[in-house]
Image (cartoon, rainbow, N blue to C red):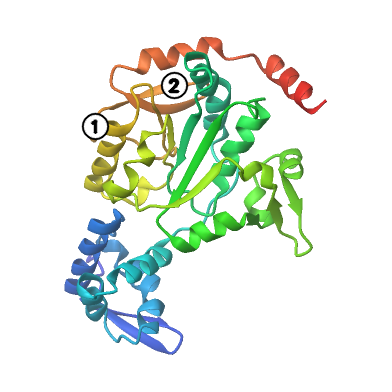
Amino acid sequence: MMQRREPQSAVFRYGTESLSLPVEVFVLLRDLIVRRTGVYFDDSKRGFLADKLSEGVASLGMTSFLDYYYLLRYDTDAGQHWSRLMDWLAVPETYFWRQPEQFEALARLVAPAHYARHPGEPLRIWSAACCSGEEPLSIAIALTEAGLGNHPWEIHASDGSPAMLQRARHGRYSERAFRQLPIALRDRYFRACSDGTWQADPGLTRNIRWTLANLANPVEIAPLASAHVIYCRNVFIYFSEDAIRSVVKVFSERMPETGILFLGASEALTRLGVNFELAEIGSGFAYVKGGQRQRVEALNGSMPSQADAAATGKARTA
């Protein structure tokens, strides 16, 4: 059976306008984007990339993607155009309490071990690619629920999209964002608004610092990567393997030896030849530097029982 081939120059429509993305221009634009952002579009995503960019490119008064390529590469205001591009490429689909076992591992094992080793030293956590803020807020909820609200901790939440970061700072969410968060936690940490949305309690965000940072830029992420714990979840699924290696290299160089790296459930580093190995922490998994797996997994013996955890929660809310 003959396979259907995509035309060499496809036309993608938005409203009454259209832009053509020939294969050769797609390759130029794709390779430039992956170098600057880490995000990779394989050949099957040519139409997807054009759909993502068409309306924005036309709003700049351009009639071709080749013109846009030259704008990104050579224009004196290229920095502003790259910021806008990051907004166009952003994937805003996320929600609270995603992979909760990783929040539980932080709050019930990693954080107590940190405070035992370094009394009084803040636990530094980086939520990389934080999107609209659900992940760092979930981290703050987990630490507070574990009775660690009086311990020193700080969360640095970053994203490469200025628009996403502005949404995160605003801290207002639709009902859909809470589809996995227990209702009791939603009601405890968010205020219902008249328009049907929910506003994060200011006390929940007081230890969160919002930062604009492009994961593919080592200079921007190096200071953040010195955190004790990094959540970098569901972003590498969009990156090229070379881009992942580059980012993880910065993590490896900057994280403390005892650092913990949480990735998304569908992401893996084992075949990339990097200095991280998979470790089981509580009921979840994380990556640790080579040679640290046994030490980290030893924390599992200190995990309180479900009954103890429940008693702690009742005491906190009494």
- Disc 1 marks which amino acid? Val
Q: Is residue 22 visible?
A: no
Pick whichever of labels 2 and 1 is earlier in the sequence. Answer: 1
Is 19 situated above or below 303?
A: below
Helix or strand or loop: what does disc 2 sit on? strand
Q: Is residue 313 left or right of residue 284?
A: right
In front of the other: 313 or 279: 313
Q: Secondary structure at mark 1?
A: loop
Most extreme residue toward the front is 120
> Which residue is labeled 2 in the image?
280
Q: Is residue 182 visible?
A: yes
The residue type indicated by label 2 comes to Glu
| Quadrant in the picture for residue 146 | top right
Residue 227, placed above or below residue 67: above
Instruction: Report the side of 284 relative to 52 (left or right).
Output: right
Q: Where the N terminus falls, by quadrant?
A: bottom left
Residue 201 placement (x, y as % from top left): 70, 47
Write the residue at 75% across / 65% down: 195
Give the total number of marks visible in the rendering: 2
Instruction: Specify the quadrant that holds the C terminus.
Output: top right
Q: Position of residue 274 (x, y in %)?
A: 24, 32
Instruction: Find the distance from the CA under tag 2 to the CA under tag 1.
Output: 18 Å
Report the residue marked by disc 1. Answer: 274
Residue 70, position as x, y percentages in the image: 21, 76
